[in-house]
């Protein structure tokens, strides 16, 4: 055993020693946070610009997967479901979160945790969770490192305790990764999206399965696309989903429309004071914009939109320190819907199928009188305020509505609606869209969410935001039924079994919107709340 | 408030390199490791007001780094599209010249262990943390940390034994 330990120590030390210094955080950040030159191993060379860390940015952009099992009491005779023992649609008393720590069930009243289930194993984690209409029967789907996803079912008692927690005898196909889960009102049908698991590109699909028999039907998407953000009507006939279109966005404003695979080059000057003899006076960024979806020739691929901030918040980051010796270094940085950075430059290894939209980093002195000159390090006792914001990417406004009663096995046959991002005064991107219990409406959150990393707060949106309804007949707007001004935008997570209560996140909180307005359910205390942790009721 | 902010900055100034090395052992390439550490910094900075116990700050940051590494590894394992080649990890065959074949075997074996075992072993034998510190970092009980390390070593021994 000692031999193993020695080899382990030796190998890990050797790896550690492959790095002898790291770039500093950022000039602005360093001065803003009083990171002294002395304590910083990389302080002598051109410092790495402080990019909003991609993983953080990506985590806030992760669409809340999962659909909604909804049913109106008494519609179409659903009511009590004998097969699954599910009660009638009920106003939620619990909500569940399938996150990094497994599944957590909380009370709507006060947000207290009532039950918890750890992740199934080190290599398997829950990726989506949904409730049937009675708010007692829940389903969850997992993904695993070995690409063998599983489905789980559990029932809550009146105290919110999990009575039984079981894996279903059937599972999504091996070699897939579930993207999202939706449940019919009585819990007899599940819908889930799948994406290829592993490293090979492949095709996404949408599967509807009978929870009693395990029988399933699959709709296949075009190569490289998929379905996320599923929701299902109470009768299980209609499934609403967001097409897994990987939007690509970099910094620049106003919005530029570029053709797919266009290349955008920007010059980012490096301040003289920050440049050292071995660093470049100017760094050119080349941002290659590649559409995430390769559409067929006959289809209009649509433009990729690049948003940019004039203050040029992106600074090229040579991945290798030696690059800085080139006086006219060019750092090609590819922004792609992939979590893996290029070897040439790790500018934005965006999360797959999603992307951050934009960010801006600014360092301002804590008090104007103490303003440090550019490039100088502030005194430790006078830290400047770091201002950094991440704009949360809205979802694609393109939603698909699949009639599971119609023939065919192509997901492209689903009706597509492009939800207007402005309706009745509320405007902004689409932040979650779900189908109503009775299948008559699509409910979508309209607005924008910026996360300020400086203070961890969410600045208010610039205009009115809210929850809007759209017709499932033709996608036309039906009006805004919840409007808010002067707060951060909200994201729609789920609709309850009655169709009257919306589960949302706002300002780092999980909250509820009903006829009387917004109320807080639990304060997560984290502005960077991981929307990817699926939350449902 | 200002004091806390400076503490976070100083923490990273002191431990930035070490944290990147830790992340490197988990994710395999320097670029990603740096990103992970920067994310941990941003999160710690954003949440610094909740850092009530300065004595636990480093453990908190290490946890943030490990969490970031997990996220990266998960995204890799579930990648939907893979359009971009990525930097070969330090334990890949391409990197053998950097660390040597014997070490590479150990690193590959380490990478094949369950996540908690891998983390615990690195914290114990790379960072030389005590069981208590490992438990604090990983958010588990001290006894769990100890048993995880024992199991991890045993598994590592089996893998390396089989290879040799």
Image (cartoon, coloured by chain):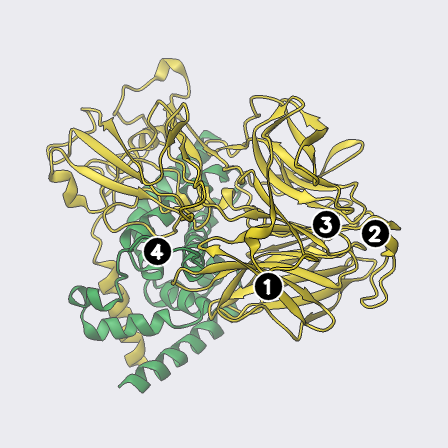
Judging by colour alone, the chain drawn in yellow in this rendered image is A
Residue drawn at x 39%, y 38% is: A52
Label disc, if present, on residue A438 of the rendered structure: none
Q: Label 3: how many residues lie within 10 Å, few (<14), some (14-19) or many (20+)?
A: few
Q: CA distance from mark 3 to mark 1?
A: 39 Å
Judging by colour alone, the chain drawn in green in this rendered image is B
Left or right of residue A429, residue A1 in this image: left
Q: Disc 1 on helix, strand or loop?
A: strand
Label disc, if present, on residue A218 of the rendered structure: 1
Q: In this figure, which residue is indicated by the disc labeled 4?
A: B23
Image depth: mark 2 or mark 1 in front: 1
Res A522 seen here: yes
Q: Disc 4 on helix, strand or loop?
A: helix
**The residue positioned farthest toward the front in the image shown:** A298
Q: In this figure, which residue is indicated by the disc labeled 3?
A: A112
Of the pair B87 and A101, the residue shown nearer to us:
B87
Q: CA distance from mark 3 to mark 4?
A: 34 Å
Q: CA distance from mark 2 to mark 3?
A: 23 Å
Q: Are marks 3 and 1 in contact (CB under 8 Å)?
A: no
Left or right of residue A263, residue B65 in this image: right
Can marks 3 and 1 be said to lie on one chain?
Answer: yes
Q: CA distance from mark 4 to mark 2?
A: 47 Å
x and y percent of residue A115 in the render? 71, 59
């Amino acid at each position: 055993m000692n031999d193993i330990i020695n080899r382990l120590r030796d190998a890990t030390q050797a790896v550690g020693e492959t790095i002898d210094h790291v770039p500093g955080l950022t000039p602005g950040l360093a001065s803003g946070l009083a990171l002294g030159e002395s304590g910083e191993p990389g302080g002598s060379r051109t410092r790495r610009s402080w990019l909003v860390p991609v993983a953080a940015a990506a985590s806030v952009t992760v669409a809340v997967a999962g659909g909604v099992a909804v049913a109106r009491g008494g519609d179409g005779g659903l009511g009590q479901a004998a097969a699954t023992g599910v009660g009638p649609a009920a106003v939620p008393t619990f909500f569940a979160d399938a996150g990094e720590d497994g599944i957590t069930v909380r009370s709507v009243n006060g947000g207290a945790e009532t039950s918890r289930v750890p992740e199934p194993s080190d290599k398997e984690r829950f990726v989506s969770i949904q409730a049937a209409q009675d708010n007692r029967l829940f389903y969850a789907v997992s993904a695993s490192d070995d690409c063998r996803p599983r489905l789980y079912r559990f029932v809550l008692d009146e105290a919110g305790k999990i009575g039984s927690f079981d894996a279903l005898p059937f599972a999504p196909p091996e070699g897939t990764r579930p993207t999202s889960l939706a449940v019919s009102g009585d819990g007899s049908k599940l819908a889930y999206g799948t994406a290829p698991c592993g490293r090979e590109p492949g095709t996404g699909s949408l599967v509807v399965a009978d929870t009693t028999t395990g029988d399933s039907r699959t709709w296949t998407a075009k190569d490289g696309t998929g379905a996320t953000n599923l929701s299902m009507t109470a009768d299980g006939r209609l499934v609403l989903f967001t097409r897994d279109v990987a939007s690509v966005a970099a910094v620049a404003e106003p919005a530029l429309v570029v053709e797919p695979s266009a290349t955008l080059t920007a010059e980012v000057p490096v301040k003289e004071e920050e440049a050292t003899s071995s660093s470049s006076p100017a760094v050119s960024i080349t941002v290659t914009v590649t559409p995430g979806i390769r559409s067929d020739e006959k289809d209009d691929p649509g433009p990729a939109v690049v948003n940019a901030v004039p203050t040029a918040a992106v600074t090229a980051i040579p991945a290798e320190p030696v690059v800085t010796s080139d006086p006219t270094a060019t750092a090609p940085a590819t922004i792609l819907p992939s979590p893996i950075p290029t070897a040439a430059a790790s500018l934005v290894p965006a999360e797959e199928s999603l992307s951050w939209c934009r960010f801006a980093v600014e360092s301002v002195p804590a008090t104007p009188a103490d303003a440090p000159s550019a490039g100088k390090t502030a005194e430790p006792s006078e830290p400047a305020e770091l201002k950094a914001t991440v704009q949360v990417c809205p979802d694609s406004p393109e939603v698909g509505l699949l009639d599971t009663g119609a023939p065919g096995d192509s997901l492209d046959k689903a009706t597509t609606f492009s939800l207007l991002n402005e309706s009745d005064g509320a405007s902004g991107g689409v932040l979650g869209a779900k189908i109503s219990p009775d299948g008559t409406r699509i409910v979508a959150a309209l607005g924008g969410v910026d996360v300020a990393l400086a203070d961890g707060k969410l600045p208010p949106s610039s205009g009115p935001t809210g929850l809007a309804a759209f017709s499932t007949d033709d996608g036309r707007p039906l009006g805004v039924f919840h409007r808010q001004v002067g707060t951060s935008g909200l994201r729609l997570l789920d609709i309850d079994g009655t169709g009257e209560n919306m589960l949302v996140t706002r300002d780092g909180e999980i909250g509820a919107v009903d006829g009387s307005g917004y109320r807080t359910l639990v304060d997560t205390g984290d502005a960077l709340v991981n929307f990817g942790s699926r939350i449902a009721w | 408030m200002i004091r806390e902010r400076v503490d976070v900055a100083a923490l990273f100034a002191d431990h930035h390199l070490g944290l990147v090395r830790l992340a490197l052992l988990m994710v395999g390439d320097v670029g990603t490791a740096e990103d992970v550490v920067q994310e941990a910094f941003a999160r710690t900075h954003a949440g610094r007001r909740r850092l009530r116990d300065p004595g636990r700050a480093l453990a908190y940051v290490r946890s943030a780094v490990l969490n970031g590494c997990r996220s990266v590894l998960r995204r890799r394992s579930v990648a939907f599209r893979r359009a971009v080649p990525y930097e070969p990890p330090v334990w890949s065959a391409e990197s053998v010249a950097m660390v040597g074949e014997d070490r590479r075997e150990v690193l590959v074996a380490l990478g094949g262990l369950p996540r908690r075992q891998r983390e615990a072993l690195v914290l114990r034998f790379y960072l030389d943390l005590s069981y208590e510190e490992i438990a604090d970092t990983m958010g588990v009980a001290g006894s769990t940390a100890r048993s995880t390390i024992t199991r991890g070593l045993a598994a590592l021994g089996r893998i390396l034994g089989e290879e040799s």
